[in-house]
Amino acid sequence: MNDKTGVIQIKPAKGRPMLTWVGKRPLRNVIAYPAQLIETYGTANKTRETRLDLWQDWPADYPKGGLLFHGDNKDVLAHLLANGFRGKVNLIYIDPPFDSGADYIRKVVLRGLSGSSRINGEDYSLGEQIQYTDIWANDNYLQFIYERLLLVKELLSDDGSIIIHCDYRRAHYLKIILDEIFGEENLQANIVWRSMTPSGFKGKSSIGRSHADLLYYSKSNNFTYNSIYKPYDKEYLERFNKHDPDGRRFKDEKIGTATTQDTINKLKSEGRIFTTSKGTIRIKSYLNEAPGLMIDDVWTDIYGENSQSSDLTDYPTQKPSELLERIIRLLSNPFDLVLDCFIGSGTTAVIAQKLGRRWIGCDINKGAIQSTFKRLQTIIDEQSVFTIQSSLPELGDKVETKNSQIPAQLSFYVYRVNDYDLQIQHNEAINLACMHIGVTRTKTDAFFDGTLGKRLVKITPFNHPLTLLDLEEIKKELANRPEEERDIVVACLGKELSVEAWLEDWNRLRKQKDFPNKIEVIELRSDPRYGGFFTHKPAQADIKIQRAENGIDVTIESFISPTIVERLKQQAGILSPQIDDWRAMVDSVMIDTAYDGQVFNVVLADVPEKKSDLVSGGYSLPATKGETIVAVKITDMLGEEVLIAQKV
């Protein structure tokens, strides 16, 4: 994919009214990182494209389907802006942390340790929030949300809207920030959703809290809105207590003082005037003239997700499907593009898929991506059962049924942004690095990878730091090109200490004698000019699995999470804590004693109840006689999984 990277300019907020906090700073520009395709699911939309030009506004570099991004949403939003999605999103729904929930400062506490063992890196986009605790300083939270709202506004179309889900802790702050960014004239509603009953907390000592706030802003005064009606309640129906001779139920209402005689005569001719026993003239309002009560800004008919729900994912902040269905139907049309950059359990993408909308989802938490993937997989499998090609509507014929809509896509794609698995293949890793730095690839050069301005670029393999041997190879290549006068840029992931002295001697000689071929090194993980090029190093484990007298013994002899080690090192430098027990990095261990290579059936789960507890590491399990495959899945404290299977 031909990613666009570099610095993306952001328009300033409108400016009034303004909320001030310590450290408030405008977001004038952001760095756009490339995206790495990780997984795909479903079928391409080629049959749909041949019949309808439904994807005419879609960026050409992206496949036509749902897009699910794993990464810090600030990085993802910048990437979307750089790659053709500016002004393309019709509806944005976000459920950000309320300053009492998801840990988006990515502070991960290793098991059994304390103090400096906390991974606390607001500048590190790789660390994932995996726990739900009150750890945010107020000013950090406000700056965090301010920057992301500035970015999503750039993505929103002129007829688009945004809904921000919040609660009493931050609703008043968020409203002022939204006024500053979107303009207070574009506040369309402060929707109150009664999401729970007040019993069970507070109540006796204070007023019980039972609602959440949905702040609804539009991009302009020309926004999409579809009226939604809910069924009449019993009290309302009882008001229609009169009947015409033909049986039609009606209620009578006062005639306004400004109503003219001509209007009254017209109503009489239509049979809509009712005269009371006292001779007062009133207007008939018939029950069957409206499909129900038009919804207002108080929603009491949608209940929070309960423990019996078939959609329950155990995700701490999961929202009910009915809530997202109402929002998506209300503020978008079939085939519109819906964005949720705090995707969580995936409900927004799931309902958008069901209702025939295109969608983009994003989350920094790997568990959220995994949960969303599984739910979407189920929905698309169900939708794919039906042959939709013969029943596709014409473009513009976007009529929804009561429960579903012809799907906009039957495929989706998972990407990483600023968190790359460079072990997938070397060529892809080079492509990512070139896009990140801005290198123009040179396909005709067998040694150098491209050019950066007037300089040649060599990207060393990412499976080792830059060594003297790498530099000697460059020296040898230049010796074979006596006419080459361009300087050299070497990109790498780290470098050996001996490299510095070699480079100093090499460049000093060229400066003194005015020789060409000066060499500059770019360390992609630490060079501030490029914002840090984060690499994804998978966790590794050494596990002993063997037959025992009564079954199978499993012993985890060692485990290492390079990501956790790197975060601690970058955070504390030489003062980073020593991890003496590998179990401090492990969140859980799962074992399947009859693994079929596809479905992992958990027969043992070691999930310590407290963060101060450690997994056991040694397990004895019963097993049937005969050959079997035992699989062990270890999940570290950042949600990274390692699966090792062995035949015994």
Image: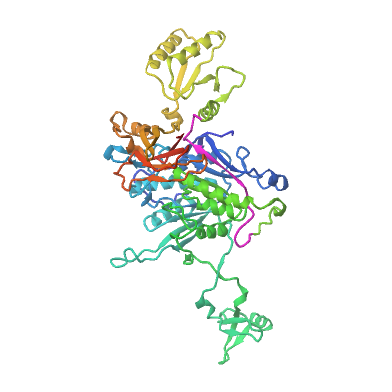
Q: Is residue 110 above or below residue 312?
A: above
Residue segment shown in magenta: 400-423
Is residue 22 or residue 243 the one in the foreground?
243
Q: How many marks?
A: 0
Q: How is the image coloured?
A: rainbow
Along the horizontal axis of the image, is 568 left or right of 345?
left
Is residue 33 or residue 12 the one in the foreground?
33
Q: Is residue 69 above or below residue 336?
A: above
Q: Quadrant of the N terminus?
A: top right
Q: Quadrant of the C terminus?
A: top left
The answer, for residue 267, to whether it is visible in the render is: yes
Considering the whole magenta stretch, tell me its main secondary structure: loop
Residue at the (48%, 65%) spot, across then down: 299
Residue positioned most to the bottom: 278
Which quarter of the figure has residue 110?
top left
Magenta stretch: includes residue 414: yes
Which x, y percent locates residue 314? 43, 52
Is residue 158 or residue 194 the one in the foreground?
194
Which x, y percent locates residue 101? 38, 51
Q: Is residue 482 above or below residue 364?
A: above
Along the horizontal axis of the image, is 200 left or right of 386?
left
Which x, y percent locates residue 576? 30, 32
Magenta stretch: includes residue 54: no
Residue at the (54%, 73%) spot, across then down: 232
Which x, y percent locates residue 252? 57, 82
Q: Is residue 577 above or below residue 267?
A: above
Residue at the (55%, 18%) spot, across then down: 448
Residue at the (47%, 66%) spot, across then down: 298
The answer, for residue 160, to whether it is visible in the render is: no
